[in-house]
Each structure stands twice: as structure tokens, then as C-alpha cells.
Image (tube, rainbow, N blue to C red):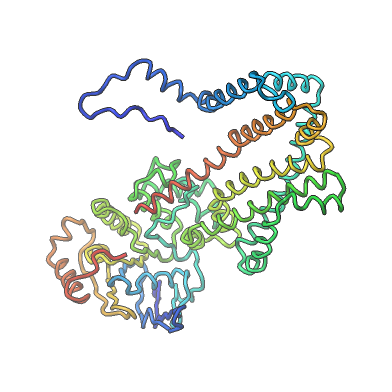
Amino acid sequence: MTTMTPPAAPTRTPVRVPLWRRFGTALLAHPAVRTLGPFVPFLLIWWAVAAAGTVNAAFIAGPVEVWQSFTELVRKGMMPSYLGDSLERLAYGVGFGLLIGLPLGFVVALSSWARRLTWPLLLFFQAIADIAWLPILIVWFGFSLTSVTFVIVYTVVFPLMLGIVAGVDQVPRELVNAARSLGAGRLRVFFEVIVPGSLPAVASGVRTGLGYGWRALIAAEIIVGTSGIGFMMFDARRAGEVSQVFLGMIVLGVLWYALDALILAPFERATVERWGLVRQMEAAR
Amino acid sequence: MNTLEINGLRKEYVDHYTGETIPAIGEVTFSIGEGEFVSVLGPSGCGKTTVLNIVAGFIDHTAGDVLVHGRSVHGPGPDRGVVFQSHALFPWKTVLGNVTFGLRMKGVPRAQRDVAAADILELVGLSGFERKYPHELSGGMQQRLGLARVLVNEPEVMLMDEPFASIDAQTRRKLQQDLTEIFEKRRPTVFFVTHDIDEAVFLSDRVVVLSHRPSTVAEIIDIELPRPRIWRETVEDPRFREYTHHIEERLGGGEPDAQAG
């Protein structure tokens, strides 16, 4: 987003922008400043509250203590190993989620009888919160990776399927007609028109699904946990290590931010922008 | 044998609210010969686009026959290429990807496709734009691409559904002139739907005038203007004005739908 617009220059006599202001504008436009800037006041307030000592140290840990426990956990190898466990579970869950959700989503989107048959079920099961499955899953699979994977798959599949249905419905009928009158059969229409045409919505579905999956993972780790970031936080609470609890929260935020900003958002933007632009042009006519 | 024959075509809709049967096309019969340019002209909502959509195989008809080289039409097919009013280009494909789509569906090898594409892009004036995406082109260029995509496929008949209706007036003139030149060079068989009388007379060998709904053929007029046609000269021809005046009267009071869609 380019929110930084240069000061509006009058039409006749251009006003000289002061040097400090131009420097400020350039600085604020820098991506690193734009990304990290908003965290600076937040960190300062946090540090000030922790350092003031008005709140009992058993309830709050300052940035310095959190940093220390971070370096300590990295040195001991716990942080890398827990992080690895969490990410591995996420990868499993999302992998299976995509494997199930993508084909199922397209079947429901394309076949009217499949949609009629499954739509009420979809809405029903979507309404059952992911962690609400945990009690029964623990009965079935115990405190295992299977239980955690199931929860993530569950959270990923529904937004993905709903995204695909919305995306397929958005594909202009005329593009399908055009392809068919250029000699494309059903299968070619699917791969050449339906799939690329619904890609922007599928991309948003994947992004939403992953976001839910990430949260579900931490919740599952807290309940099922034997390792992982969620487990680390809950375990630290028991041991009274507030700094590790804070650290866990920060790690969650940073990881998701990185995943979203570096992979998911650019992918979604790349598809939505090109496709969306075309739709806008057509609508403007 | 005629390239396209439409015999006793009828179309009825069932209104979903009232359950009534509404006739859209009363009875339409005409044919198009090999290499002939035929326009179908009529007031807005008269069902001319419905006729085209039936010929294209996008919608079913209630009665009658649509024959391409004597074969009955069922569903869309590459023997009937369609140029859409909204262009209907694939936004995720480049100009080259759009043009070669039909050949790819036919299984034409890549080298051959690229040669054919270069040839046709030259013809429509899009050489050098191969790597652009449709949204990077102007409306006029998009429709040139829509035309090229169908021309390169060498359909038995080209169906053009008000292809220039959404393009600004100046560009439209240029496109009409260029389409005429392309037609005179290649002689495809063209079924052209429009509500613009000047356009129909300028482009066509014959004009089929449809009546109001439910549409029937009001008149078929042979346009005996010499080719090659050049806009500036052709409109000066007294016969051009005779044709347009005649059609205007035919359509009722010289007030055809100015802003039809």
C-alpha cells in the first residue's frame, strides 16, 4: 500500500518542500521502517511498564528478560527443536488439508448435485469449532500427532472449500463459452479456464485456511502438547517462567507475519491484481 | 450447399415467476453462403443475439434447424468461432497465449502455432504485442485480439456479436474499416450481429432485418456496393444512403435504438 502521497502541489506556483520533510517522507516510505516502525512505541511502552516495577515480576517480563530467555533457549536447543515440531505439524496438517480440500472444493463447486448434497453438511461442520473436536480426538487417537494433524486439516479444509466454490462461481460464463467455441473439451475448460479463473479466490482461501490452521495448532499443542511452541508456553506457565510465555507469543506473531508477508500475501496479490484489473476494466465499460 | 443454414428457428422461454411461455424468436429462416458477410440487424431486445447464441451452441432452441455445411449443430464447437461484445479474452494469458489457444486445443505443434499467430497478429495490427496481457491493451486492441483468436482457428463460420458496440466511436470506425479489409483479403464466412445500421450496410454483402419480439425476418437486403470498400468513399455512394434510409424506415420511423445493448 502506498499511503504516502507527496504533498499536493498547487497548480501554478510549486511550493518548495522543506528538506526535513522530504527526508521524513523518504524515511517513512522505506519498507523496513514501514514494517518495523509501528512496533517501536509498543516496545517502549512495554519496556517502560516492565521497568517501572509497579507490576509484580511474576506477572510481566520486560523485553530484556524475554530476549535473555530467547538466547538461552536457543543455546539449549529447545527453541529450534520446539519450533521445528510446530512447523512440522503445520506442514503435515496443511499438506493433508490441501490434498483433501482442493479436489473436494472443485467437485462441490462444479457439480450441482454434489453441492446440493454437501452444502448443509459443510455449513454444519464448519460451525463446530476446530478445538471442539479435541476431546473426542484424544479419545480416539490419544495425545498424538494424529490428533493435532486432524485439527489443522479440519480448520484448513473449510475456508479452502468455500473459497473455491466462490472462486468458481466468479469465473465469467463467457470465458467458458469462448474456450468451448475454440475447441476446448470439458477437461481442457477445467484446467485452462476454471482453475486459473478461480485462482485468486483459491489463493485467499489458502491464506485464510493457513491462518486458522496456525491458531488451531497452538491451541492443540496447549491441550495435547508434548512439544512445540504452544506446549512450551503452557509448560513455562506451570514453572512460573513468565518471560518464556511472552517469548512464545512473540514467536507466534513473528512467524506468522513472516509466512504471510513473504509467501502468502505476494501470491494472493499477484493473482488478484492481474485478474482483478481486468474485471475492473470490464465493469467500467 | 450453404455454409450456414437457419431453418424455421424458434425459441421460447418459460418465465420463472408466472410460468408463462414467452416467445423470443417467432420464426427465423435465412442462410449464409461460403465467404459471405451477412449482418443481422434489429431493434434492441429483438432477439438477434439470441439467434447468434443458438448458432454458437450456447443455448438450446425450441424448434427448427441450424446447419453448418449440412450438419446439425449441438453445443459449441470450433467450426463456429465467436467474437464477443465483451471480448472474453483470457486475462491470465498473453496475447500470444490467447491467439494460439484454439490451435493448441486442436493439437497443432508449437512451431506451427507460432507461425500462424505471427501471421494473424500482423493482419490485425498487433505485431509486437505478443507478450502483453489483455489488460495492458486498449479496448480496440482487445477486440482485434478477439478477432485474431477466432480468425487463426479458421472456423467454417465466424459469429460476431456486436463486437464494436462497447468501443468509442472513433476507434469503431477504424475497426470497421480494418475488418472490411481483413474480410476482403481472407473471405471468411461471417454472421455479424449489430444494431448500427451504417455499420451493417458498410460491412455486409446482405443484411437480415429482424422485427420486434418475437422476432421474424422482416426483410433481407442485398447490399450491392462495390468492394474494396473504404469508409469515406462508400458513405458518399448514393446507394449507401438509400440502403440505410430504407432500413431505418423498415425498423420504424427512422428511430432505431441509439443506445441499445
Residue A256: x and y in percent read: 64, 35
- Give the vertical position of B154 relative to A225 (above or below): below
Residue A24: x and y in percent read: 42, 20
Name the foreground residue: A153 vs A186.
Answer: A153
Residue at left 18%, top 69%? Answer: B244
For this view, does B113 lie left or right of residue B158?
Answer: right
For this view, does B199 lie left or right of residue B79?
Answer: left
- Give the vertical position of B14 relative to B43 (above or below): below
Name the foreground residue: A108 vs B64.
Answer: A108
Name the foreground residue: B249 vs A118.
Answer: A118
Q: Residue furthest front?
A: A54
User: Which quadrant of the figure contains the C terminus of chain A?
Assistant: bottom left
Residue at left 74%, top 45%? Answer: A93
Splitting the image into 4 quarters, where does residue B176 fall?
bottom left
Residue B13: x and y in percent read: 43, 79
For this view, does A250 lie left or right of residue B87?
Answer: right
Residue at left 24%, top 28%? Answer: A10
Q: Residue furthest top?
A: A19
- Give the vertical position of A67 relative to B163 (above or below): above
- Give the vertical position of A23 relative to B242 (above or below): above
Residue at left 69%, top 49%? Answer: A155
